[in-house]
Amino acid sequence: MLVLLIASAIAASLLVELGLMVAREWMEASQFRHKDEPQMNGAFKRTSGGGW
């Protein structure tokens, strides 16, 4: 019974890792991220370059 529990935990962990890899690849290939990236870069430049 313990072996079955350990095996199912390992299988679940591997499935989660696979899902995260697929989600990361999908987000990197997405055009939505690329549209927002210049806006975010501009926001970071404005806030980091503020005069104190």
Image (spheres, helix red, strand yellow):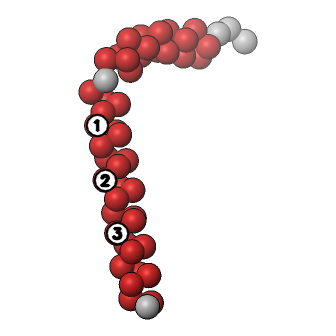
For the residues marked 2 and 3, what is the alpha-carbon distance in whole angstroms?
A: 11 Å
Q: Pointer 3: what residue? A: 11
Q: Residue flagged by tag 3: what amino acid is it?
A: Ala
Q: Pointer 1: what residue? A: 25
Quadrant for the C terminus, please. Answer: top right
Residue depicted at 39% across the width and 64% down the height: 13
x then y, percent, for residue 46 = 57, 9
For the residues marked 2 and 1, what is the alpha-carbon distance in whole angstroms?
A: 11 Å
Circles 2 and 3 in contact, beta carbons < 8 Å: no
The correct choice, above or below, for 6 with respect to 38 in the image is below
- Outermost residue on the right side: it is 52
25 lies left or right of 12: left
Q: Pointer 2: what residue? A: 18
How busy is the neighbourhood of tag 1: few (under 14 within 10 Å), some, or many (20 plus)?
A: few
Residue depicted at 43% across the width and 91% down the height: 1
The correct choice, above or below, for 1 with respect to 48 in the image is below
